[in-house]
Amino acid sequence: MLRRLLFVLFFIPILLFSQEQNTHTTYLDANYFYGTILRHNKDISHLITGHPEGLIIGYNQQTYGSERWHKLYNYPDYGVSFVYHNPHNTTLGENYGLYGHFNFYYLKRNLMVRIGQGIAYASNPFDIEENFNNNAYGSDLLSSTYLMLNYNKKHLFKSKLGLQTGISLIHYSNANVRSPNASTNTFSFNIGLQYHLDEASENEFLPEKDYKKVSEPIHFNLVLRSGINESDYFGLGKQPFLVISSFLDKRLSYKSKLQFGADAFFSKFLQQEIEYLYASRLDRSLKGDEDFKRVGVFFGHELRISNPLAVVAQFGYYVYYPYDFEGRFYQRVGLTYYLRKDVFLNSTLKTHAAKAEAIEFGIGIRL
């Protein structure tokens, strides 16, 4: 499971980055950050005792228009980054993360938004005997996302140095792969420097090509998703799950695709939870024979970032819901990577608002 997590959350973006063969401007950046852990959950109040600080170090390549998506997204950068996070709390320990990221530019390229997705190592996760107070990180490997909003000034005084400063948000969670999983979100201010590794200017963009408008008929999709997760009731153990999804999609443009479909959820951790709550009489409303399966319908959108990579977001509602778990509405967000036009892999996070249920790994076909 952890190897698959590493592959989908980190290696897929690297596959994307390795496609480009043209000459690029490359640069390094290093940012120091200082902030606070947000109290998104009262259960982590005892962990917010200090002000986190750390470093975000990135390797970046600029795009120039050799691919259609470069112009559509205002010539973004892509790269890899490393985050060192010290919350100054001995219970939480330190985190070390590795990410794939994109930098998007606005306001004449003076405003930069970075989105990074990867995996982090927690040095002091929950342990029932030695670190039972760490209810934020139930495992030593965590899924992690970070966002940066920076003022960006490259080539100060026509040199290879640049300046960036702004705010960032760093999220850590294992998506209920192992309990507990209260997670953390760090909001911080950051300031850093850039160093360009060559002499090229970010303004040397290729002229825009005359691309044809993209529109496709409705297609049918079938996706199988799986993984493991665990109930919030500690000690019930990790259980496998299976999700069968079918949906119709309609591509509206090169970037945008709409989806409508249904999910069937077979989550063994819910079966364990129902049996435990009934046997322990912690929930006296249960009869013990409640069905752990669920069926939902959803509406979604796929945003194509590059030729093989897309971001998907779906919003669903359970129409078959025999056992009450986190409410009837659910969401799914993640990445889809097209191996071919009609075959794809995806990694998605399924949540109920701010409460994560599982990381899903899937393979699908588009007919």
Image (cartoon, rainbow, N blue to C red):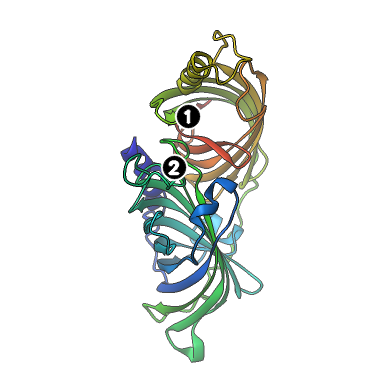
Q: Which x, y percent locates residue 344? A: 46, 34
In the shown orientation, is residue 105 left or right of residue 59? right
The answer to whether residue 273 is above or below residue 329 is above
**Closer to the camera in the image, 286 or 229:** 286
Q: Residue 279 carries which label?
A: none
User: Label 1, on which residue?
Assistant: 233
Q: Circle 2 is placed at which residue position?
A: 174
Q: Is residue 51 above or below residue 298?
A: below
Q: Residue furthest bottom?
A: 157
Judge whether residue 259 can be spotted in this image.
Answer: no
Please name the residue shown 59% across and 59% down the image.
73
Q: Which residue is drawn at 40% across and 47% down?
A: 142
Residue beneath the point at 64% across and 15% down: 285
**Quarter of the image with the C terminus in it:** top right
Q: Earlier in the sequence, mark 1 or mark 2?
A: 2
Looking at the rendered structure, the number of numbered marks drawn on it comes to 2
For mark 2, give the secondary structure.
loop
Could you say where residue 356 lies in the image, as x and y percent from the top left?
A: 54, 38
Q: Please state which of the two labelled residues, at mark 1 or mark 2, is closer to the viewer.
A: 1
Give the amino acid type for the residue marked by disc 1 in the picture.
Tyr
